Image (cartoon, helix red, strand yellow):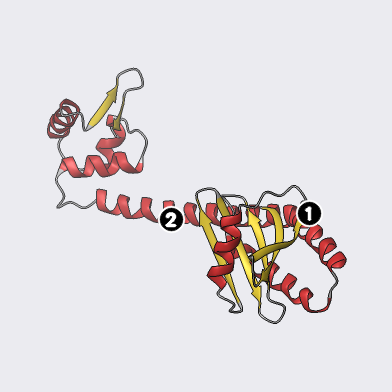
């Protein structure tokens, strides 16, 4: 989410100087101003700077020799704002400082709602992707757990990786081996702290 926006102009004596900013009480470290100016090196471009206490995306207008800098919170993805700052850059060629200030206020204010919708949409897509990944991994692990050439120890571990807990009855349905051997292997795995057993709920679980 944007925290503020400011413009940098080049001065032959002072170097990069802040021309306009919003909000007015926006604190901008002088070293950062010079770092952004140097990074663009007078070439029309957009640049992202993300450090411990700073996250921004900026665009240099070569014709006007002005850099527009959008300050973001530390969790924001700068790629989400490149189009926004490029569009604002087009206003520099035919807009007064007063009009620019209004646009700067609108960018910071409107971006709050725009970002909220984008974040929700992005999170929804990520959740859907994770659910698909979880489904695919579960199916793969189930297939591995049912492979007859794997030893019983491996199949028990795969089964408990897929499921949070499994009862002995359900384990016998999945792992085809003798009850005696299955019980023996389970005791060994419990003894070696690889799996655990909850006597109250009568189920086994993987330790991690």
Q: Residues within 10 Å of mark 1 (few under 14, many from 20)?
A: some
SS at badge 2? helix
Which label was assigned to residue 109?
1
The mark that comes first in sequence, 2 or 1, is: 1
Residue in the picture at 37% in, 35% down: 164
Is 103 placed left or right of 50 in the picture? Answer: right
Residue in the picture at 57% in, 49% down: 74
Q: Are marks 2 and 1 in contact (CB under 8 Å)?
A: no
Which label was assigned to residue 133?
2
- Tell me the distance, in whole angstroms, between the alpha carbons under discs 2 and 1: 37 Å
Is 22 placed left or right of 182 in the picture? Answer: right
Is 180 placed left or right of 204 in the picture? Answer: left
Image height of 147 relative to 11, above or below = above
Which label was assigned to residue 134?
none
> Could you tell me residue 127's position as x and y percent?
54, 52
Nearer to the camera, 36 or 30: 30
């Amino acid at each position: 989410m944007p925290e503020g926006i400011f413009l940098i102009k080049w001065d032959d004596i002072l170097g990069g100087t802040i021309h306009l900013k919003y909000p007015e009480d926006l604190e901008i470290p002088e070293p950062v101003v010079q770092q952004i100016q140097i990074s663009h090196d007078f070439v029309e471009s957009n640049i992202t700077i993300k450090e411990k206490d700073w996250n921004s995306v900026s665009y240099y207008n070569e014709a006007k020799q002005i850099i527009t800098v959008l300050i973001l919170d530390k969790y924001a993805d700068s790629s989400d704002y490149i189009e926004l700052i490029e569009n604002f850059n087009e206003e520099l060629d035919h807009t007064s400082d007063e009009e620019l200030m209004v646009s700067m206020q609108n960018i910071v204010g409107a971006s709050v709602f725009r970002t909220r919708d984008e974040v929700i949409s992005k999170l929804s897509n990520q959740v859907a992707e994770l659910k698909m990944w979880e489904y695919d991994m579960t199916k793969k692990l189930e297939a591995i757990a049912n492979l007859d050439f794997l030893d019983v120890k491996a199949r028990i571990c795969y089964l408990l990786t897929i499921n949070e807990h499994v009862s002995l009855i359900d384990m016998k349905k999945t792992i085809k081996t003798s009850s005696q051997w299955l019980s023996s292997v389970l005791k060994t795995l419990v003894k070696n702290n690889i799996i655990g057993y909850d006597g109250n709920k009568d189920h086994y679980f993987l330790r991690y």
